[in-house]
Structures are given as structure tokens and as C-alpha cells.
Amino acid sequence: MPAKTASKGSLDTPLSGRQRILPKFSPDPDAFGHATEGFARFMGTPQFLVYMTVFVVIWLAWNTWAPLEWQFDSRALGFTLLTLMLSLQASYAAPLLLLAQNRQDDRDRVSLQQDRQRAERNLSDTEYLTRELASLRIALREVATRDYVRAELRSLLEDMLEAQEELRTHDPAGQAQHESPRDKIREKLKEQRDRQRNPRTQQIPRVKPGHSTQDR
């Protein structure tokens, strides 16, 4: 049984390419936009007005005072050719000005978007720097200053001198004879530091190496 031919409107049948009578015209948007902007800018300059005025004056003078056989735009018909030419110029000038205005609007939109993004980045950078400065200020509060270090060293030196002076005057009861003066000063400073930090531990007896609680 022969296979059935697919219908013309079937979805699985590709459509044949249509032939164009005229070739597709797709100019470069950038090049065409530059050309239109250049022409629109030239039309807005004083040079264009001067050139246009000189051209119209010469046209009218030639077709008014020149011999009839040399005239090409009759004055009796109201300069029809000049009127038609100026109408064509005006009809083409309006779209060109609109195209130039559209391109300018696109540039302004892109510039505004870039300015907004730049402002957002600047705001985020400013907030980050503000947070960093705040954290740095907080960290500097916890750093020991020069006066604080000097005061601590001075207090430690006074404690050492006081402990050394006490050890020179008398030895504590039950002290080992073989203990050096440096160990004595260190032990004295440790006792003073313990009393300053935790006064509740003053009543706890200290057990030294080589001695028991019974000896005391």
C-alpha cells in the first residue's frame, strides 16, 4: 500500500522558502545612525541656514529676471519646483531629526544607567569603609596604650622591689634553704598577683614541692 502523502498544512512538513521579489534591505544601524545624526547636526547650524538662504535667493532671482528661455521654474506658477523641493526637504528632515533624537535618548538612558550603577558602587564602598572604620575604632579601644603599659611595668617593678626587700629582711617560715633569690621573688610576686585577682583563694594553703601539710 503506497504511503500517504503528507498534507500541505501538516506540522511535520517543512515549509519551502519564499522567494522575495525585492532583495531584503537591512542597513547597518550604527552607520545609518551616524549619518542621520551628522545631517541633523548640520541642519541645526548657522551654516545650513546661510547656504539655504543663498540658494533660495539665487533660485528666485534667476527665475525672475533671467530670460524666459533660461528659466526652469516659472514665476507665474508660483515657483512650483522650489515649493516641491522644500516640501521634500521638510518631509525628510523630520524623520532624520526623530532618528537622531532617538539615538540621543538611547545614549542618555545608557549614561543614566551607568551613573546609577556607579552611584550604587560608591555607596556600597562608602558603607564598607564606614564599617571598617567602626571596627577599627572598636579594636583600638582594646589595644594597650603606652601609658597603660608603662603603668603596668611600673607596678610590676614596684612589686619586685617590694618582694626583694621583704626577702632581704626575713625568710618565710618553712622555706627551703636551697631555694635561690630569684625563685623567692617569683614566688612572692605570684602570691601578690593571686591575692589581687581572687581574694577568696587567700585562705587556701599552698603546698610546696618537698613539703607536706603535716610539716606545717
Image (cartoon, rainbow, N blue to C red):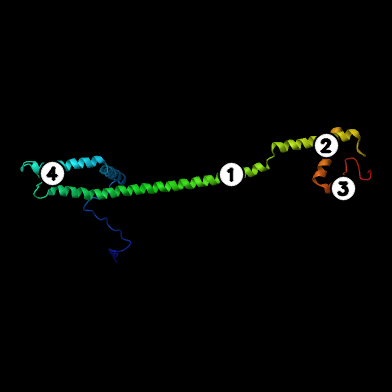
Label 2, label 1: how far apart the Cα atoms are: 43 Å
Q: Residue at x 49, y 46 (%)?
A: 121
Q: Which residue is mark 4?
A: 60
Identified by mark 2, the residue type is Arg
Could you tell me which secondary element the residue under label 3 belongs to?
helix
Tag 2 or tag 3, which sits nearer the N-term?
2
Q: Along the horizontal axis of the image, is 155 left or right of 109?
A: right
Tag 2 or tag 4, which sits nearer the N-term?
4
Tag 1 or tag 3, which sits nearer the N-term?
1
Q: Which residue is mark 2?
A: 186
Label 4, label 3: how far apart the Cα atoms are: 125 Å
Q: Residue at x 58, y 44 (%)?
A: 132
Label 3, label 2: how far apart the Cα atoms are: 20 Å
Q: Along the horizontal axis of the image, is 62 left or right of 193?
A: left
Identified by mark 3, the residue type is Gln
Please name whichever residue, 50 or 108, is drawn nearer the observer in this view of the structure. Answer: 50
Residue 104 x %, y %:
34, 47
**Cβ–Cβ below 8 Å for labels 4 and 1?**
no
Identified by mark 1, the residue type is Glu
Q: Residue at x 58, y 46 (%)?
A: 131
Identified by mark 4, the residue type is Leu
Label 3, label 1: how far apart the Cα atoms are: 48 Å
Residue 38 x %, y %:
28, 42
Q: Which residue is mark 1?
A: 132
Camera-nearest label, 2 or 1: 1
Tag 3 or tag 4, which sits nearer the N-term?
4
Q: Along the horizontal axis of the image, is 85 left or right of 67?
A: right
